[in-house]
């Protein structure tokens, strides 16, 4: 599955999770231990803003962070439009870890977004059931690429998933995520 198709499946899934987050949930911890819910949203908005500009061959402007719940959708839409522009996947993109071919980095964006969606859903007690084909494509990419990025920030050490883990839970565990330990939020 190509990365534009992957983003087309991912965007409404992420939009649905974010639409169900309330202001009083923004300071909750997430399985991405570096970030709260607000921090994950800020990270995703900042990345979407910078990478949309990179895919357009432009300098990135400052991301709009004031209301992260309201600003998430427009930032994600802009990124999707930029990646879907003819020729965008042929560009070299300046990623946080170096210059990367545009198509490969679009796959990274999907992996990152898919797992951060799980972070947000888990932290806010929402169901999160992305299509198996999307998870499989992201997992294939992850297994080919993330070992050098296991630095405790982008990705931690692989965690053993539960025997009955769903495909997204197995992918989250592969990226170093652990379920939150608190039963109440």
Image (cartoon, grey):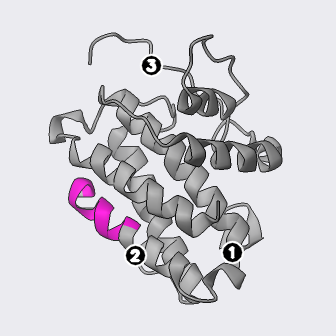
Of 161 and 156, the residue lying toward us: 161
Q: CA distance from mark 2 to mark 3?
A: 31 Å
Of 142 and 86, the residue lying toward us: 86
Lower sequence index among marks 2 and 1: 2
Can I make out residue 27 in this image? yes
Q: Is residue 28 above or below residue 3?
A: above
Mark 1 or 3, closer to the camera = 1
Horizontal and vertical percent position of residue 29 = 38, 29
Q: Secondary structure beneath disc 1?
A: helix
- Report whether 66 appears left or right of 57: left
Q: CA distance from mark 2 to mark 1?
A: 16 Å
Residue annotated with mark 1: 102
What residue appears at the point 45 percent right and 54 percent down from the top-left corner? 10
Residue annotated with mark 3: 180
Which disc is residue 78 wearing?
2
What residue appears at the point 23 percent right and 41 percent down from the top-left corner? 21
């Amino acid at each position: 599955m190509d990365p534009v198709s992957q983003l087309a499946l991912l965007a409404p899934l992420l939009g649905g999770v974010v639409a169900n987050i309330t202001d009083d949930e923004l300071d909750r911890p997430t399985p991405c231990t570096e970030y709260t819910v607000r921090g994950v949203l800020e990270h995703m908005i900042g990345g979407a803003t910078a990478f949309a500009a990179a895919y357009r061959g432009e300098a990135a402007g400052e991301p709009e962070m004031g209301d992260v719940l309201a600003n998430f959708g427009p930032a994600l839409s802009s990124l999707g439009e930029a990646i879907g522009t003819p020729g965008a996947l042929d560009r070299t993109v300046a990623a946080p870890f170096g210059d990367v071919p545009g198509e490969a980095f679009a796959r990274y964006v999907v992996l990152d977004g898919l797992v951060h969606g799980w972070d947000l859903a888990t932290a806010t007690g929402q169901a999160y059931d992305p299509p198996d084909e999307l998870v499989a494509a992201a997992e294939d990419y992850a297994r080919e690429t993330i070992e050098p990025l296991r630095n405790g920030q982008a990705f931690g050490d692989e965690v053993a998933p539960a025997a009955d883990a769903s495909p997204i839970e197995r992918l989250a565990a592969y990226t170093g995520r652990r379920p939150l330990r608190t039963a109440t939020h």
